Amino acid sequence: MSLKRLVKRALRPIVKPFVDALAFRVADVAARANSADIEFDLHVMTALRSLAASGDHHVIPPYDSAGPQKAGQKVRIGFFGNIANNAYNLTTCLRRLGYDAELGVEDGGFDVFLLNRPFWEDMEVECDTYEEGLTHEREWRQPEYVRRVAYDPQLQGRYWGRYSAIPEVQALYRDAFGLDLSMDRAVLLAQQMGHWPYLLAMKRYDVIQLSGPAISMGAFCPRPYVVFPTGGDLFISPFEETVFGLLMRTGYRNTGHLLLGDASYFDYCDRLTLNAHRTFAPFMIDTEIYAPGQSDEVRARWIHKVGGKRFVLNVCRQAWEWKGNDRLIHAFNELRQAQRYRDWRLVLMQWGPDVEKAMKLISELGLEAVVLWEKLVSKPLVRKYQRAADLVVDQFVMPGYGTSVLESMAAGKAVVMRPADERSQAYLKEPPPFLGAMQPEEIRAQIEKAHDDHFREDIGKESYKWVNAHHGYLSTFNAYIGTYMSVLSFANRMRGPKN
């Protein structure tokens, strides 16, 4: 499943009622005599386009001080938008350091997708479908710093599609937050009132971090907020000419600060012509959980199933357009033409849009006996696979890297993937020790180099050292906390870094 399709699947329960109704109106324009509905939709889109072109115009009290009014560990930080559990892990790490951080999760809404559920980070789950995976959540013991609210379809229906909802929504907003809401924002919020419990949950915090689809709530966020994109919420969503896309664009434009975990994100922010301060804050990895270790049971199971002595694990989903997994399969086939490398086996994850294509290619190349498929599994099991593998392979297409790469490095493994570009290296103290490759012949050559046990182990040690220095939570938390403080202080915000 492509990144775009994953984002759409996760968002479908949230935006589908509104989009379906809007599509019905547009499709049925010629047959309907009442033009009021058309006019209403046009007004909604006009308001959206206006806000999507605006900026951060929140009133900031002009405190004559160099720092915020609260000490860092007394500020309450709320995280909303839990793409791939990045926010959950970040919250856990900050709390370990003594900060008052909590995660807000919207059931039935923004966080409905399986891989965005916190239990997926904590429990060992193996499943064939997303629906099957979700059945295990009831066994999870929810930490006290995870606060769950439910998307409210009744509220969505009550306010949606009418001008008369504007003063009602304004009154609700004023009563809840003590803030006035302009008419254009009120008419837009009336179309999003299913998320009202989610917005109310933000009231308890001093500063908010928004990620993923939750960025679309930036137009209505009652507190100063930071935007922390994680991938498709920057590459795709804010560029779409839809209600949701324009809300995402508004969320970016109204933020007080952008936290960017990958150097490639800066170019996308330039495309959106964003004026907010930008800080490079490397993706934070919990290096107490993601760490070297033994996984003898997994390795023994692999040997029993497909034999071999060395295992290369492709840890990402099968999505050829975004990951280039087909290049790995061709490279592995070429590798096995030499007798010396016949003891290598390939382990693939059986999820994503191109699983069937991958299976067909493997069959055509005659590799079925030396390729092992693992089901969709939760993060504790992924960690075991990373530790069991001799070599980890990620993606060869996209610039930059995500947390799966870093988590493999934290396990002390050498990683074959697209090499870091010059811009990425410019933001780091030292370049990552990736075994860089993009094309099948380059991938094969890197696996051949990794056949040398000493070379592979040395790169693994370098990887472990590098990820702790550049992405470990102890080395990165100051960048995050400094940014949260900056949006609370007039003086700090005016002097904040703009990289």
Image (cartoon, rainbow, N blue to C red):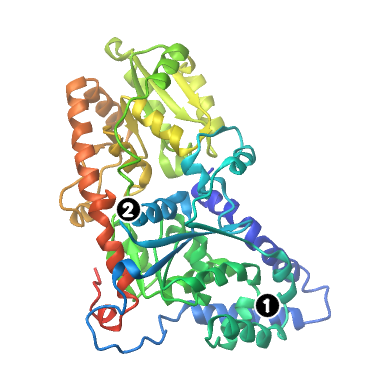
Name the kind of residue labelled 1 in the image: Asp
Is residue 242 visible in the rendered structure shown here?
no
Residue 166 percent across, percent down from the top left: 66, 85
Estimate the spatial distance between the alpha carbons at disc 2 and disc 1, rounded to whole Å. Answer: 39 Å
Which of discs 2 and 1 lies nearer the camera? The answer is 2
In the picture, measured across the screen, residue 18 lies left or right of residue 337, that is right
Residue on which disc 1 sits: 41
Specify the quadrant of the image occupied by residue 90: bottom left
Q: How many marks?
A: 2
Residue at 24% across, 39% down:
434
Residue 343 percent across, percent down from the top left: 33, 13
Residue at 40% across, 68% down:
76
Is residue 96 visible in the rendered structure shown here?
yes
Residue on which disc 2 sits: 283
Residue at 25% across, 83% down:
491
Name the kind of residue labelled 2 in the image: Phe
* Quadrant of the drawing holding the N terminus: top right
SS class of the residue under badge 1? helix
Specify the quadrant of the image occupied by residue 259: bottom left
In the picture, measured across the screen, residue 3 lies left or right of residue 289, that is right
Residue 436 percent across, percent down from the top left: 25, 38
Specify the quadrant of the image occupied by residue 486: bottom left
SS class of the residue under badge 2? loop
215 above or below 235? below
